[in-house]
Amino acid sequence: MSEYLELFGIAWLTLIIAAIPLSLLGILVVARNQVILAIAASQSAACGAALAMLLIGALGGGHIHGDLRIHLGAMLGGLIGTAIAWTGTHERAAWLFAAAGAGTILFISHSPYGMHDVLALQHSNAMIATTRDVVLFALITITLLFFLKRWNTELRLLAIDPIHAHSCGMDVSRWNLVLGAIIGLVLSLAVSVFGLLYAFACLILPSLIGGSLIKSFKSLLWLAPVISIGATILGIVLGHTFDIAPGQSITALLAFVYPLACVIGWQPSDSKTSLDQAERSG
């Protein structure tokens, strides 16, 4: 086992740390009934990374995993996608997902790396995460925990009832801008480092699972990260045991647990309803 830790320990640690900020931000996304936004923004980030690869190749250069230019492309794509979809309609987000999905494939279609890049962006490329990625997501986690502790009440109110938040004197437009930027940046980085599948699953599914099991919104702030970390660790073990990429094994585990949580918690499958009930109780 020690040789595997030496080879993949950094990648596994990065996955575990990244599970925390993704699951915390996912609570806000699910509470606002913006799951389709997360899908669209994730695909937009992948499209931005693909465009960066295309431009690097067109300029006669090569790239490696973790290339800063690809990270920047993903962040730009994710931020643009979030800006388009965050306060827009579901129809706009659906259009963005379709356009960005087609763009991702088209931009990489003539890449010298070809299908490898497509699979890395759309599914999982977490196994070659670097020490820099560990530090990056650790800093993101610390910053986000401070943000949630400092403005916990405001964030809860904004997530559940933005109309009431406005009536209480909050600048909802500014808060939406800040939250959209944070979600877009973190999601874009996760897509660039781990691939779309893991990033989206850890953003959304822990909140859906937790919201089906408990009544308190406040409790969800610790339960969702616990679920995300637990699923990531178990998914890594299962992936290592059965020779499956960790991104896929973690996502499959979360997807398997969610319907079980709905049955155990006897909650409606509609995520917005579940979290609204949780806030009124908590």
Image (cartoon, rainbow, N blue to C red):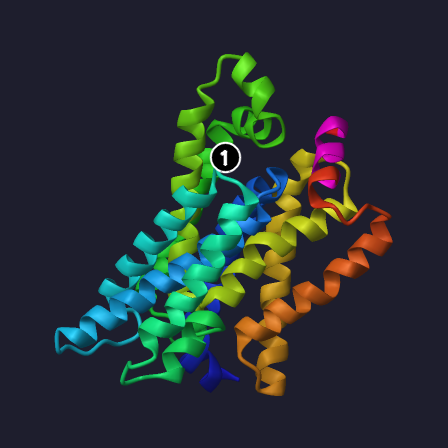
Q: Is residue 88 above or below residue 260?
A: above
Q: Secondary structure beneath disc 1?
A: helix
User: Residue 22 location, x and y as percent?
Assistant: 51, 52
Q: Is residue 202 above or below residue 141?
A: below
Amino acid at the residue labelled 1: Leu
Q: Is residue 18 visible?
A: no
The stretch drawn in magenta includes residue 96: no
User: Residue 58 location, x and y as percent?
Assistant: 17, 75
Question: What residue would you read off at disc 1?
Answer: 148
Instruction: Say left or right for 55 vs 152.
Output: left
Q: How many marks do you count on the picture?
A: 1
Q: Nearer the viewer, residue 216 or 171?
A: 171
Q: Nearer the viewer, residue 3 or 184?
A: 184
Q: Is residue 180 visible?
A: yes
Instruction: Say left or right for 108 vs 253.
Output: left
Looking at the image, which residue sits at the far left? 60
| Viewport quadrant of the C terminus | top right
How many C-alpha atoms fall within 10 Å of the one at disc 1: few (<14), some, or many (≥20)? some
User: Residue 60 location, x and y as percent?
Assistant: 13, 78
Q: Residue at x 82, y 46 (%)?
A: 267
Specify the principal SS of the magenta part: helix
Instruction: Say left or right for 99 vs 245.
Output: left
Instruction: Say left or right for 190 vs 135.
Output: right
Q: Is residue 138 above or below residue 162?
A: below
Which stretch is magenta?
A: 274-281
User: Residue 243 location, x and y as percent?
Assistant: 57, 87
